[in-house]
Image (tube, grey):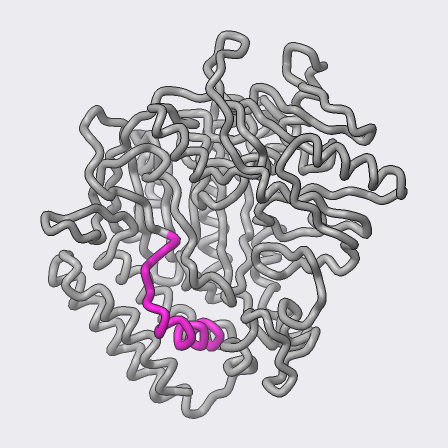
Amino acid sequence: MLTFILNGILILGSLAWGSGSNSGDELALRSALDEANTELKTALTRTSCPGTELVISCGNGKCEPKLGENETSCAIDCVPALIHSYNSQTLCRGVSHVYQPTTVAEVQQIVRAASADGQHIRVVGRLHSANEQLCTTGVVISTEKFDHALSLETFDGKETVVTEPGITLYDLGEWLHARNRSLGYAVIGYHGVSVAGAAATGSHGSTMKHSAVVSSAVESVWVVGADAELREYSALNTDLATWKALRTNLGMLGVVVRLRMRVQPQFNLHVKATFDRDDKLFAKGGVHKLMKDCDFGLINWFPGSGRIMRSCGMETTQAAEPGAANVLLDPGIPAYIVNPFKKVLQYGACYNWIGCLVERVRYLYFKVAPPYEKLDEFGDLVPTNDAIGASHRMMSSVLTADQKGFFQMDWEIAIPYQKAQAALEAVRDHAKKNHLCLPLVGVFLRFAPSEDATLLAHTVALGDFHKGEPVMFIEMPVYLPTGFSKDQQSAYDRPYEEFARL
């Protein structure tokens, strides 16, 4: 086991050699790997961690009691559930049937039948949520196969796209790109979610300058109600409060079967990734200075390492470079490294200092292999910290295909502009006190101007959230260990729950 764990860290770093970065960064990464190797050799021979074998099999879709899997230790494989959240933490046992309609008429038929049987209905998209709103004791309508963009139309003086609800943000972005259009900055960091789901949950992109909440781009929705009748709602025919609710409906105000989204001409972004100490976050005007000039911008903060990675994109009239894309969530780890890396993360959940070693390696790895790519002069895709590409491709990333079996939870809090700096300082102190490190991708710091278009989006202009002022989102993507007892899991979760309360 020790050999697997060490190789997982060492190979992860070796992937980056020869990627075109400067030798100083490569030497720093190799030094960090050597340090991790030495410390792990000394420590792991004298320590143990529950779940380090189970972490390999759990998540493969087979319940294997001989390997120690059961409904408690590996719920995703052993609990029968037709619906489960993307991170497999919410399992819906009571769902009686999942329908996947492809037409409005099919939806109406499903609603009529369910209503006649007195069954509740829940609507889901790509299941990129992690709470009980996914579940019901009745039937589920999945929009996954209801996934086509339909047309470009002018509506109320605005150019819009009419689309079915289950199309992913990426596929819609590509469809619009082929017609020289885009959703602007209403594009979230992971582009595999459905457009209706992104709107229904108030999902957001990252910019201090432009509208970035997906639901704010919704100009009308077609909804099949409990009576199975189809109606189109918009600001033109609906009272304000109801319209705001429909824009962020959580899938609970009927079945959205079409959306009309505001679009704009496509544009290119020149994105650069830069690396620095996190002192810059806490200097006077820190976050604002780092982000104010960026049309698109986010920060990955590695608090245990005291470092930041800043991505800043500026609109440009320069042509897109071949192959230019954001690959932040798809680091290209070969399949043979996945299992060793799972064990490394599992050990990091047992021992904070191991998680901190991995966080440091992850930061240095990003310096050597930055989270953007483009074609080089030989036609090969290579990592780069400087690329020009189509807007949606530069702001959003595919999620690694190796996500299956990696369990995580995202803790995200929205902070009003005037309290952003104080909040960061409080989180820094909290992380230091609890020895928190984030080995997956650090802490995301994202931004969006506060708007007043919905009742539910995180950027609603109420209280300390002033319309037009930037909101800062602090998001912690946290590895979830496998095979922990209830008490062990509770102790592991406690610092993140305290972060949320803080």
- Residue 226 is situated, as x and y percent measured from the top left of the image, at 81, 31
Residue occupying image coordinates x 29% and y 51%: 371
**Based on the displayed image, in which of its 4 quarters is residue 216 positioned?**
top right
**Based on the displayed image, in which of its 4 quarters is residue 286 positioned?**
top left
Is residue 290 shown above or below 85?
above
- Residue 125 is situated, as x and y percent measured from the top left of the image, at 61, 43
Q: Is residue 36 left or right of residue 61?
A: left
Residue occupying image coordinates x 69% and y 27%: 223
Residue occupying image coordinates x 43% and y 43%: 189
- Residue 153 is situated, as x and y percent measured from the top left of the image, at 49, 15
**Based on the displayed image, in which of its 4 quarters is residue 94 positioned?**
bottom right
Residue occupying image coordinates x 44% and y 92%: 46
Q: Evaluate whether residue 466 shows in this view.
A: no
- Residue 80 is situated, as x and y percent measured from the top left of the image, at 71, 66
Q: Nearer the viewer, residue 451 or 104?
A: 104
Is residue 40 shown above or below 313?
below
- Report if residue 332 lies within the magenta region: yes
- Report if residue 331 lies within the magenta region: yes
Q: Evaluate whether residue 369 shows in this view.
A: yes
Magenta residues span 329-347
Q: Main secondary structure of the magenta part?
A: helix
Q: Is residue 340 left or right of residue 309?
A: right
Q: Nearer the viewer, residue 167 or 20?
A: 167
